[in-house]
Image (tube, coloured by chain):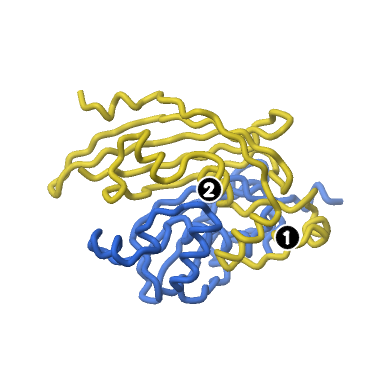
Amino acid sequence: MLKYYEDVIVDSPFPVLKKDPISRVQLVKYAGASGDFNPLHTVEEVGQAAGSGIIAHGMLIMGMASQGVTTWIERKYIESIRVRFQKMTFPGEQIHVIGKIIKKIENNRVIGEVKAVNDEGEVKVSGVFEAMLLSKDKEG
Amino acid sequence: MSKVMDLIGLELSPYSYSVDKVKIKEFAEAIGDLNPIYFNEEAARQEGYDGIPIPLTFLQVIDMWGGYSFMEKCHILGLNPVKILHGEQEYKFVKPIYANDVLTVKGKVDEVNIKKGSSGGMNIITLKFEYHNQVNELVAVSTNVTIDRH
């Protein structure tokens, strides 16, 4: 895991986090855990009426993107994350979380990019995060 | 002027909710994030946390379970539940949030934009939420952008 500001290599990709395919049971679990009971995520008829079929919670995909970020950099160093929901995700799709640091800024802070994509590379969620890392200077 | 513009500045009634370690576990498990810091206090302390921390998107739990349900929110904001999309979401963390913290949340409509497009227009509604802990420290701010298609 990335810990020190001095170790950051801008634009070097982090290891890809490959998630299990999204199941309907997972959507039921996420609905209960998050409290988002929009029926579009769990009820077949509502999905049909909407024309899309059942779709995954966007926030579940953001949660997976966040999991990716916190496998690259410890949770406690993350100061913010902002995402844009770009495409619907359907049960059966498998999310890959990719990312890299795009900029080093002052005070040991870095800005990173994170994307959740499917097997075909379609971007479902894209975003940026900011982290404050440690400095080797201050460790001595 | 459209009625939706009247929403700007609308303040939602505050709500409070305690961060429960069982809920953190349930939430992390639903995402499939098995990082031990979310499941075991000892593991979290060994990693330098003062308790079980919340996953980056956990504040959604506080908002949905402690605040307004999806349908209530649609009603307050005059949104059509089958026409809306979650456009963007941001969390900014000011101080750590751990299991057993009690958060009080104040939300308001920060911005409304109306866009016209070839396939019909949309209202873009930005909500901002501030989270204070039990000793009244600001711990996080979230921004939610909802798109309501006409």
Q: Is residue B120 left or right of residue B11?
A: left
- Residue name at image x 68 percent, y 34 percent: B133
Badge 2 or badge 1: first in the primary sequence: 1
The secondary element bearing badge 1 is classed as: helix
The secondary element bearing badge 2 is classed as: helix
Q: As rendered, which of B115 and A130 lies closer to the eye? A: B115
- Residue name at image x 81 percent, y 47 percent: A138
**Which mark is drawn over residue B135?**
none
Asked if B94 appears above or below A73 in the picture, the reply is above
Q: Amino acid at mark 1?
A: Ile
Q: For mark 2, does the 10 Å Cα neighbourhood hold few (<14), some (14 to 19), or many (20 or more) residues?
A: some
Q: Amino acid at mark 2?
A: Gln
Q: Same chain for marks 2 and 1?
A: yes
Q: For mark 1, does the 10 Å Cα neighbourhood hold few (<14), some (14 to 19), or many (20 or more) residues?
A: many
Q: Does residue A13 show up? A: yes
Q: Does residue A114 show up? A: no
Q: Which residue is mark 2?
A: B60
Q: CA distance from mark 2 to mark 1?
A: 19 Å
- Residue name at image x 65 percent, y 68 percent: B34
**Which mark is drawn over residue B37?**
1
Q: Position of residue B14 (x, y in %)?
A: 54, 30
Q: Position of residue A93 (x, y in %)?
A: 40, 74
**Chain A on-screen colour:** blue
Q: Position of residue B58 (x, y in %)?
A: 58, 51
